[in-house]
Each structure stands twice: as C-alpha cells, then as structure tokens.
Image (cartoon, helix red, strand yellow):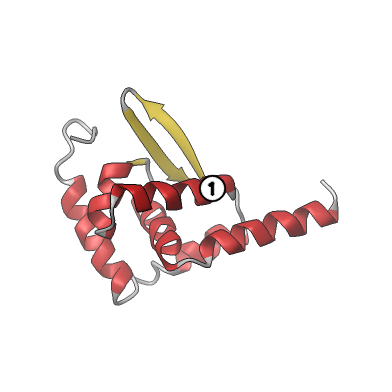
Amino acid sequence: MKAGQDIETAVTALKALADVNRLRTAALLAHAGRELCVCELVDALEESQYNVSRHLGALLAAGLIRKAKRGRWAMYALVNDKGRLAEYIGRLLRPRPCRGIIAADIARLEKRLALRRRGVCV
C-alpha cells in the first residue's frame, strides 16, 4: 500500500469517528468485545434504527467495523487490526468507562445484553 493510500484510509476513518453517535457506537462495540445486532445498539444508544444503521454504514465503509449475517440478524463488531484508532476507541473505556454519555450507553447495553438467550439477540 502506498503512503498516500495510508493517509486516505486514516482520513476516512477519522471522518467516520468525528460524529458523536458513530464514536459512541464504536465505543459500545469495543466494550462488548463481540458482535452486536442493530437492535441492541438501538436500545443502548436510544437512537432510531434508521440512524443507527446509517452510522453503522459509515463505520463499515471506513473499515472500522465488520458485518456478518446471522439468519435474519446483521451483527457488527469492531475490526481489531486498526492499530492506533482501535487503541483510541479503547481508551474511551479505560481505566473504567468514561463518565457521561458513553457510561450511560454501556449501562443500557449491559441491560439489553442480559436479554439474550443462548447468546443470541431476542
């Protein structure tokens, strides 16, 4: 990969994270450390399904997350090989979840994940 391509990739990823809702979404995926479905993210973020899906699309296009179909569910997870960007997203959660909006998102996500049956979204 050429240096110019590296810069373009970084700019695309940074632009995707420049939106507060996309950054919140990435932080939730980092916290979960596993695949989450759209409905779990909708409940955690308290945003509409349309908006969450749009933000997931931007993160996916930037190469920050991956998508997998599991039956009728679309599952999303943070890509682990993004180096410093993944490290930055992880810092939002350490040494403990940051105060404010992301901590509240995480609390809602934990409640939502408790509803899973045999590890599957319901």
Residue 83 lies, in percent from the top left, at 62, 56
- At horizontal 59% and vertical 63% (from top left) the residue drawn is 15
Residue reaching furthest to the front = 50
Residue reaching furthest to the bottom = 99
Residue 4 lies, in percent from the top left, at 83, 56
Q: Where is residue 107, by image quadrant? A: bottom left
- At horizontal 40% and vertical 60% (from top left) the residue drawn is 27
Residue 37 lies, in percent from the top left, at 32, 40
The residue carrying mark 1 is 80
Could you say which is closer to the camera, residue 48 or residue 31? 48
Pointer 1: residues within 10 angstroms few (<14), some, or many (20+)? some
Could you say which is closer to the camera, residue 117 or residue 25? 25
Q: Is residue 7 left or right of residue 41?
A: right
- At horizontal 59% and vertical 50% (from top left) the residue drawn is 62
- At horizontal 60% and vertical 52% (from top left) the residue drawn is 82
Q: Is residue 105 left or right of residue 54?
A: left
